[in-house]
Amino acid sequence: MRAPSGEQIELVAGGQRVVVVEVGGGIRSYAVDGRALLDGYGAGEMCTSGRGQVLIPWPNRLRGGSYEFDGRRHQFALSEPAQGNAIHGLVRWSAWKVGERRGDRVAMEHVVHPQPGYPFRLELRIEYELSSSGLSVRTTAANTGAEACPYGCGAHPYLSVATAGVDSVILRAPADRVIFSDEQGIPNGDAVVDGTAYDFRSPRLVGDTRLDNAFTELERDADGLARIELRDATSGAGADVWMDETYRYVMLFSGDPLPDVNRRSLAVEPMTCPPNAFRSGEAVVRLEPGASCTSAWGIAPVSP
């Protein structure tokens, strides 16, 4: 019987094992020496709660599913109807194809054709690769249409580094500002993290902190990468989620309202633009015809 997530593409390198899927082109699982780093889903299951999914051409929520671009108004279907939003782009449930493949690497490809709400054409390619430093994910979008288009991208991995769940994770998130949202999940303000429960610039326990916030003004290392660090408070095992300079935002989500997550794992979501960006215009990439945009992020395992 065909798996709900379609073809299963397994990558192996040393003790690392990743499964990339045809449906949505995302990551179903990632384990190192038998230790799961992602809170994924089974081969016989459909993806829930966005696990490992690709968020293109916009991440997170768009109020009312509508926006204006170059003087024209566009309307998406409300894929989060209870909140009146369109959420997480157009490719999460689309079939992707394998462009290149070898034992430790695969390139997944997909074309976003013109459609209601997004009358533009994007050719997408995501390269997943394992190496001695972990998993890297390189996403390229090329505008192969006749007019400019708005673009943003993100990813939705849930990191699982502590058997006791999020409360016993030591988190370092080097971000100077936190974004707050209203009851629809739409930004309604931001603040410096100083003196708030959202200041994780120095490593500390998540504890009972409820996280469902985007963060920005990310501190970067000498190599230009921002790193979100997660460690099991007991064993010291964990992972770093790194993001290149195109990812100016990261969403941290402890999954409290979701019965299938419920603080078992922490979503660390690299985003090139914030929630509601197609309406606000903040950090949206304008891709001219023939132009492309490449972004990279990854997961570096940390041994106990």
Image: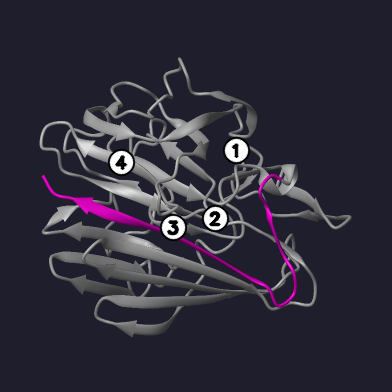
Amino acid carrying mark 2 in the image: Thr
Is residue 304 shown above or below 98? above
Q: Decide whether residue 115 is among the magenta residues.
A: no
Magenta segment: 282-304
Q: Please name whichever residue, 12 or 257, is drawn nearer the observer in this view of the structure.
A: 12
Identify the mark nearer the N-term, 1 or 4: 1
Question: Residue 184, located in which quarter of the rendered image?
Answer: top right
Report the residue marked by disc 1.
82
Amino acid carrying mark 4 in the image: Glu
Identify the mark nearer the N-term, 2 or 1: 1
**Residue 229 got which mark?**
4
Residue at 36% over, 22% down: 209
Q: Nearer the viewer, mark 1 or mark 4?
A: 4
Q: Tell me the element at label 3.
A: strand
Identify the mark nearer the N-term, 3 or 4: 3
Crowding near pointer 4: few (<14 within 10 Å), some, many (20+)? many
Report the residue marked by disc 2.
246
Report the residue marked by disc 3.
53
Q: Measuring from the top left, give residue 279's x and y in whole percent.
A: 74, 45
